[in-house]
Structures are given as structure tokens and as C-alpha cells.
């Protein structure tokens, strides 16, 4: 039987990634950032959970392979985040919860299983979830789980697309509809939710008006250019206030030059530096959960999309660690 890989334990008592001075980064376990699995640690503050599911896509399939690709591209992540002066794997116990095995043929069954699977991890560990998709359909069951614990939350949604359309081919639950369903179900705080990175052609002008009625403000990709990262952070923080925040990141918010490996690419998107900078600007906000979705590795080149997604996850983990360090008031729970 193989001996456990050498890991460092932080002063806070948390078990970190495999020691890269002893096991090269291209070797060792295939967990996110080579972190321990949830069954290898005695407590979990943040669980990284894979949801390999893409039966809700409308164009290119393949996001079912997203979790594995993001994990493979996360091997080079190091323990210290200079931007926030924080050790995301040291201040909190981060562990990989593996993948949910959900039905690829029955969308309704899968959506129910994703909610139940997320709930099982949270109830077993008490952890906050950072979920690796999967297509954007998964945000709906994840928000249902979050709502059951926190009530309505502010949703900060990064995407080229609104994802508040009504139906496709009569289907109400798809990767283009999760935030309309979430709004209808009362899962989101309609006074505090926001899209960032919206661009490209719509079906009709009315889409934007309907989206506002559903509870979203939008910062378009063009506005990211004109007001800059600092301006976006200001707008977003003003909108979110001090509400608990769920962050949902469709990797297609990035320009196809920065993230070609995705299902519905749109020209004119954010750079990965802009996205990382905006996320860093959210320090201090109370993240109750997050997802990174729509990574479809079959269309990726040179791991561009996988590396971008892995760094986005790292940024989210850094925000969670920073919040813990500040000792801010815990989120209200029901
Ligand atoms: Mn999208
Ligand atoms: Mn989306």
C-alpha cells in the first residue's frame, strides 16, 4: 500500500497541498491543487465539489469534463496569495469532495441529485462549497440548497449571457434559464443581484427589461472597458451591500482568446486579469458559496481555459480565507 503523500500542516492546524519540494507538481493526487480529500481530514471549512453534468447545454456539449480539467490545471497553484496577503489553504481547511455522480440522461433527476448531493456534503462537513461545473444548469439546484440554509442571497453572476431566458424547446430548466427560475422561486435577493460581463446579440431588446424585473442589474463587458476594474468593483459592491453573496462564474465571461474551451463563446469578453482583479476587489464580502461552470476542455488549447478557471477558484478560496481572517460576523442562517 502506498504511503500518504507528504503534506504541510499550517499553524492553524490545516492540512495543505502535497509538498511540491518532495513530489513534483505533475505527479501526486489529482485533487484540486493536490489538496487532501474530505475523507483525509478531520474537519472541512471549504469543500471543492465537482459536478460533471452537461445535459442542459444548448450549443457545444462537453462541460461534463470540466471538473477533471480544472483540477488538472490547478496543479501549479501555490500556497500564498500576494494580492490579499493570505494563505487560502492555511487559514482554512480546504478539501476536495470529489464528483457527484448524476444521471446524464434525465435532467430533472440530475437537478434533484445535485441539490441533494450538495446538501449531503454541507451537512456532513459544515463546509462552504466551491463547485466545479458542469454546465450552468447546476446553479439552480445549488442555489436551492443555499436558500434552504440562508434564505434569499445576492447572486453575483459573471457571464457573457443573462441566463434568465424562459424556455428552450419548451424546457424550463437548461443552462440558459437558471437565474429566471431562481428569481421566480424567491431564491435570490432581487434588490442586490448583479450580472457582470454581459455582451453579444440577444433574442430581443425586451430581454434586458425582463432581466431587470427579475432582480438583476448588469455591468456589460463594454462597461468593464470604460469604467475599469476599480469602477466595476465599486458598482458591484454598491449593489451587493452587506448581503450574503453567492458567486456564479460562467467561464464564457472571458473572451474566447482567454477561455476558448467553453460551450457558447462570445467575442468581446473580459481578460482573465480583469476577472481576477474584480474578484479580488470583493474582499470582505460574505461568500456563502460559489461555482465555476461551462469549462469544456475539448475546445481548449494549451490549458488556457483550465488555468483561468483554476485561478478563478483560487481567488474565491482566497476571499473565503480573507473573510475568515477578518473574523467578520458569520452569515445569518435560518
Ligand atoms: Mn454563458
Ligand atoms: Mn451561463
Image (cartoon, grey):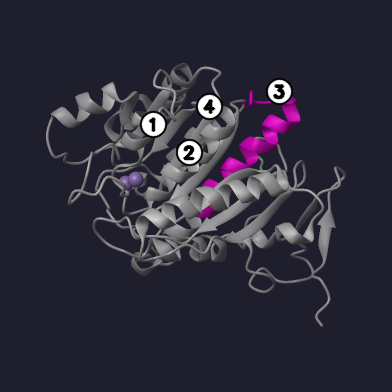
Query: Mark 1 to mark 2: distance in Å?
Result: 9 Å
Question: Do the numbered discs 1 and 4 sit on residues whose CB atoms are within 8 Å?
Answer: no
Residue annotated with mark 2: 144
N-terminal-most mark, 1 or 2: 2
Q: Residues within 10 Å of mark 2 (few under 14, many from 20)?
A: many
Query: Mark 3 to mark 1: distance in Å?
Result: 29 Å
Relative to 207, is 23 on the left or the right? Answer: right
Residue 28 image offset from top left, x and y in percent? 69, 72
Residue at the image position 36 percent from the left and 69 percent from the top: 298
Task: Name the mark nearer the viewer: 3 or 4.
Answer: 4
Residue 48 image offset from top left, x and y in percent? 61, 52
N-terminal-most mark, 3 or 2: 2
Question: Do the numbered discs 1 and 2 sit on residues whose CB atoms are within 8 Å?
Answer: yes
Q: Is residue 80 visible?
A: no
- Kindly state the secondary structure of the residue where label 3 is placed: loop
Residue annotated with mark 4: 151
Q: Residue 185: which disc?
A: 1
Residue 84 image offset from top left, x and y in percent? 65, 35
Q: Residue 251: which disc?
A: none
Query: Mark 1 to mark 4: distance in Å?
Result: 11 Å
Query: Mark 2 to mark 4: distance in Å?
Result: 9 Å
Relative to 78, is 251 on the left or the right? Answer: left
Magenta residue span: 308-334
- Kindly state the secondary structure of the residue where label 2 is placed: helix
Q: Residues within 10 Å of mark 3 (few under 14, many from 20)?
A: few
N-terminal-most mark, 3 or 4: 4
Residue 170 image offset from top left, x and y in percent? 19, 48
Q: Is residue 210 visible?
A: yes
Amino acid at each position: 500500500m502506498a504511503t500518504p503523500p507528504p503534506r504541510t500542516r499550517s499553524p492553524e492546524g490545516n492540512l495543505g497541498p502535497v509538498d511540491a519540494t518532495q513530489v513534483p507538481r505533475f505527479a501526486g493526487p489529482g485533487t484540486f491543487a493536490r489538496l487532501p480529500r474530505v475523507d483525509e481530514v478531520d474537519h472541512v471549512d471549504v469543500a471543492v465539489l465537482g459536478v460533471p453534468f452537461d445535459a442542459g447545454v444548448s450549443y457545444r456539449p462537453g462541460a461534463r469534463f470540466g471538473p477533471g480539467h480544472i483540477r488538472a490545471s490547478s496543479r501549479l497553484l501555490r500556497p500564498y496569495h500576494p494580492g490579499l496577503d493570505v494563505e487560502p489553504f492555511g487559514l482554512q481547511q480546504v478539501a476536495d469532495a470529489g464528483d457527484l455522480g448524476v444521471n446524464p440522461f434525465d435532467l430533472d433527476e440530475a437537478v434533484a441529485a445535485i441539490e441533494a448531493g450538495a446538501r449531503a456534503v454541507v451537512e456532513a462537513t459544515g463546509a462552504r462549497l466551491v463547485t466545479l461545473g458542469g454546465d450552468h444548469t447546476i446553479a439552480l439546484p445549488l442555489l436551492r440548497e443555499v436558500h434552504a440554509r440562508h434564505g434569499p442571497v445576492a447572486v453575483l453572476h459573471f457571464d457573457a449571457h443573462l441566463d434568465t431566458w424562459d424556455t428552450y424547446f419548451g424546457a424550463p430548466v437548461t443552462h440558459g434559464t437558471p437565474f429566471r427560475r431562481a428569481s421566480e422561486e424567491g431564491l435570490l435577493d432581487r434588490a442586490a443581484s448583479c450580472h457582470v460581463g454581459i455582451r453579444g446579440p440577444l433574442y430581443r431588446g425586451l430581454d434586458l427589461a425582463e432581466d431587470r424585473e427579475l432582480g438583476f442589474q448588469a455591468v456589460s463587458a463594454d462597461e468593464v472597458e470604460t469604467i475599469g476594474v476599480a469602477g466595476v468593483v465599486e458598482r458591484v459592491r454598491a449593489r451587493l451591500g452587506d448581503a450574503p453573496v453567492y458567486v456564479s462564474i460562467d467561464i464564457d465571461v472571458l473572451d474566447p482568446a482567454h477561455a476558448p474551451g467553453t460551450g457558447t463563446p462570445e467575442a468581446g469578453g473580459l481578460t482573465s486579469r480583469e476577472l481576477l482583479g474584480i474578484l479580488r476587489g470583493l474582499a470582505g464580502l460574505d461568500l456563502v458559496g460559489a461555482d465555476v461552470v461551462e469549462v469544456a476542455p475539448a475546445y481548449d488549447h494549451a490549458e488556457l481555459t483550465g488555468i483561468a478557471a483554476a485561478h478563478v477558484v483560487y481567488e474565491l478560496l482566497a476571499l473565503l480565507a480573507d473573510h475568515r481572517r477578518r473574523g467578520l460576523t458569520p452569515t445569518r442562517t435560518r
